[in-house]
Image (tube, coloured by chain):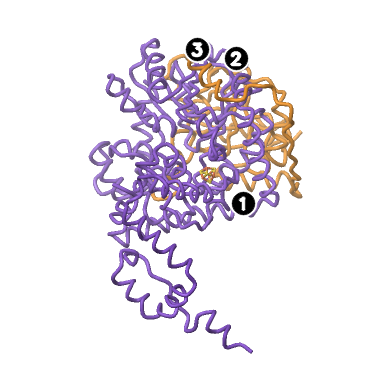
């Protein structure tokens, strides 16, 4: 407590009277979907499109062994919320999660799943499949406009698979997180 | 050892120095390509600068707002005045949680505080999980760059290190292979760690949440598996609202590595059921910087762009700087904290201002360094012979007659100075023109 008041005593704690104003004119790309796929592929991710009715068969082709998902797809073998042992989690091959929207400029998807309490599945599996049913926004500015009033406990943008270039600037896919990330855009 | 001496060591192997220079220039070029693709990039830099300036101006208000909202979210907020208090708080949290093994993702603040050695001395095992940081940790050295901690090492050196420490195949120096060795080794640690420590790229006052950006996924994997998550953050990491992140997430990775965004941009707001989330807010002289002429140095978002572009950093390496954070921004912070020991860093600079031009929050970096030179000269720390040289040079340059004579004489004296003087070691005096401007001018009709 002492430290808090000592630190704050050196800082301005009054409510701001001036306003923070800035404006940015973003350039919207011709095709949001094309920019999104280009950026996603540049980030090392894969892109697929599927109709709602053929989604199950698309997922069947994409997955093989253990598939964790809190959604009841035919390929789902387990609900991640039912796993409480980290070792079992680490044996999972694949996870299917849902994103709220995508971002055209960088191929990122926003994931905020209230139903999924097991946060490790986004990084612990080898293959992350992201179902994208929502819209694609041009840039992160529009993205955060959508999130600003959203309620979330833990949310993340993911753009492609986990990667590193820490050894001589050589890009290596699959650092600690998923080695493969596939975004499946579901056409409505 | 001061910067000049350490740089000399670094430059001894000229092919290595060239390799290092080119490796960083490559990153700078990636940054240029990525930023050129965004037409409104300059507007974004201006906005980023504005947001930071505004928040710093009202820092106390936003810190309190952050604490209030974070507490509502179930986060435990702690305050530390200095490094010692920070380390004590972290240790107490770990003790309460009965944690022994800790995984840590990148955090320059914990480097600044010397957290690793503090915890190791108290019997904890702390593992850096960012690949570059893990490499330097295994070598027992500090990161040489804030974004690319092992940029000073060649793959052969890393391969040999892994052979010795991680039992990798002899003679296999392939980066993909070496990364997979580190992945497997660290997976074990992730699965058994009791606590995870992360830094914070941003702390959002209005939502009471913490934002961490990584490419590897180590922050998310570590925090989601361990029972306790501790965030170490400096007071300057605050931004008012999520909306402002739209600006920062657009400039950060582009400036750092030339990516459009980091792979993971994670928002921690409410801890998972049955788990703990602690945030330690650290001052450690930041409030003094805030109340000085160097305030804008606190706007730094640690992208590393000023290092990649700096002609001195590229040719002297991160380990030549005596402060935890190397390169242009580190020289400001170092000189501010310890003018005596780190004031010479103000001279590890050509005043070319290339750093100012790439900085995503538009910090006038070179102006700060220039002002530290003035302070250093006025202090008693400046080596006496340098001071004498400066003073004599000033005298000569102020006297027109003498100055003109020197200029005329320079075609003979400069080559001599290159060979004989201290100044000429490692640099060349400019080649004088055949005629001085004055001589030329006098000849005109
Ligand atoms: S001073 Fe600017 S360029 Fe340097 S690391 Fe900080 S934000 Fe990046």
Q: CA distance from mark 2 to mark 1?
A: 36 Å
Residue to which mark 2 is pinned: B73
Q: Are marks 2 and 1 in contact (CB under 8 Å)?
A: no
Picture coordinates of residue B89, whole percent (x, y): 41, 17
Q: SS of the residue at dot 2?
A: loop
Task: State the quadrant of the C terminus of chain A.
Answer: top right
Disc sitting over residue B35 in the figure: 1
Which residue is more in the foreground, B181 or B378? B378
Q: CA distance from mark 2 to mark 3?
A: 20 Å
Which residue is more in the foreground, B105 or B301? B301
- Callout 1 crowding tier (Cα within 10 Å): few <14, some 14–19, many ≥20: many
Q: Do pointers 2 and 3 mark residues of a single chain?
A: no
Chain A palette colour: orange
Picture coordinates of residue B110, whole percent (x, y): 41, 29
Q: SS of the residue at dot 1?
A: helix
Of tags 3 and 1, which is closer to the observer? 3
Q: Chain of mark 2?
A: B
Which residue is more in the foreground, B199 or B225? B199
Above or below, A7 against B303 in this view is: above
Q: Do pointers 3 and 1 mark residues of a single chain?
A: no
- Callout 3 crowding tier (Cα within 10 Å): few <14, some 14–19, many ≥20: few
Q: CA distance from mark 3 to mark 1?
A: 44 Å
Q: Chain of mark 1?
A: B
- Callout 2 crowding tier (Cα within 10 Å): few <14, some 14–19, many ≥20: some
Picture coordinates of residue B57, whole percent (x, y): 63, 31
Q: Mark 2 vs mark 1: which is more N-terminal?
A: 1
Question: In the image, what residue occupies the spot 53% across and 54% down?
Answer: B30
Chain B palette colour: purple
Question: In the image, what residue occupies the spot 36% across and 49% down?
Answer: B382
Residue to which mark 3 is pinned: A1
Disc sitting over residue B20 in the figure: none
């Amino acid at each position: 407590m002492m430290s808090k008041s000592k630190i704050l005593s050196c800082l301005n704690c009054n409510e701001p009277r001036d306003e923070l104003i800035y404006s940015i004119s973003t350039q919207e790309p011709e095709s949001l979907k094309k920019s999104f796929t280009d950026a996603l592929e540049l980030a090392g991710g894969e892109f697929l499109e599927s109709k709602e009715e053929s989604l199950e068969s698309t997922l069947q082709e994409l997955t093989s062994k253990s598939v964790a998902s809190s959604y009841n797809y035919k390929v789902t073998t387990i609900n991640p919320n039912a796993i409480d042992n980290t070792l079992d989690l680490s044996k999972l091959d694949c996870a299917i999660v849902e994103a709220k929207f995508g971002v055209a400029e960088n191929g990122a998807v926003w994931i905020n799943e209230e139903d999924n309490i097991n946060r490790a599945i986004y990084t612990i599996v080898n293959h992350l499949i992201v179902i994208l049913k929502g819209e694609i926004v041009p840039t992160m500015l529009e993205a955060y406009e959508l999130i600003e009033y959203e309620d979330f406990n833990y949310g993340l943008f993911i753009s492609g698979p986990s990667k590193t270039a820490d050894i001589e600037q050589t890009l290596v896919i699959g650092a600690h997180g998923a080695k493969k990330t596939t975004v499946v855009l579901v056409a409505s | 050892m001061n910067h000049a001496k350490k740089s000399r060591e670094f430059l001894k192997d000229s092919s290595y120095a060239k390799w290092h220079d080119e490796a960083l220039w490559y990153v700078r070029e990636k940054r240029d390509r990525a930023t050129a693709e965004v037409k409104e990039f300059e507007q974004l830099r201006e906005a980023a600068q504005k947001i930071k300036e505004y928040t710093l101006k009202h820092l106390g208000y936003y810190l309190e707002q952050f604490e209030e909202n974070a507490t509502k979210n179930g986060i435990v907020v702690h305050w530390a005045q200095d490094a010692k208090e920070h380390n004590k708080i972290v240790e107490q949290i770990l003790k309460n949680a009965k944690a022994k093994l800790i995984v840590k993702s990148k955090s320059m603040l914990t480097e600044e505080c010397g957290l690793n050695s503090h915890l190791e001395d108290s019997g904890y095992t702390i593992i850096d999980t960012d690949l570059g940081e893990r490499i330097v940790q295994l070598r027992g050295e500090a990161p040489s760059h804030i974004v690319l901690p092992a940029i000073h090492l060649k793959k052969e050196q890393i391969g040999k290190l892994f052979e010795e420490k991680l039992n990798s195949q002899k003679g296999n120096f392939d980066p993909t292979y070496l990364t997979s060795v580190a992945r497997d080794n660290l997976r074990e640690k992730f699965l058994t760690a009791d606590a995870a420590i992360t830094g914070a790229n941003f702390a959002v006052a209005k939502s009471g949440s913490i934002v961490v950006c990584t490419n590897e996924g180590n922050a998310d994997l570590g925090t989601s598996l361990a029972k306790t998550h501790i965030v170490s953050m400096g007071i300057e990491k605050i931004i008012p609202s999520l909306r402002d992140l739209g600006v920062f997430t657009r400039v950060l990775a582009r400036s750092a590595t030339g990516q459009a965004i980091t792979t993971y941009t994670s928002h921690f707001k409410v801890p998972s059921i049955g788990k703990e989330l602690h945030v330690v807010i650290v001052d450690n002289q930041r409030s003094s910087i805030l109340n000085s002429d160097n305030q804008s140095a606190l706007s730094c978002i640690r992208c590393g762009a000023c290092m990649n572009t700096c002609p001195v950093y590229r040719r002297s390496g991160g380990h030549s700087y005596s402060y935890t954070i190397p390169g242009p921004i580190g020289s400001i912070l170092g000189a501010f904290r310890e003018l005596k020991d780190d004031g010479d860093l103000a001279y590890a600079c050509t005043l070319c201002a290339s750093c100012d031009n790439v900085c995503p929050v538009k910090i006038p970096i070179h102006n700060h360094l220039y002002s530290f030179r003035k302070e250093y000269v006025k202090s008693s720390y400046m080596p006496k012979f340098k001071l004498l040289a400066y003073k004599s040079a000033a005298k000569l340059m102020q006297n027109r007659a003498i100055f003109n004579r020197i200029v005329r004489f320079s075609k003979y004296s400069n080559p001599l100075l290159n060979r004989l003087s201290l100044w000429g070691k490692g640099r060349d005096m400019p080649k004088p023109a055949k005629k001085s401007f004055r001589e030329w001018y006098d000849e005109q009709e």
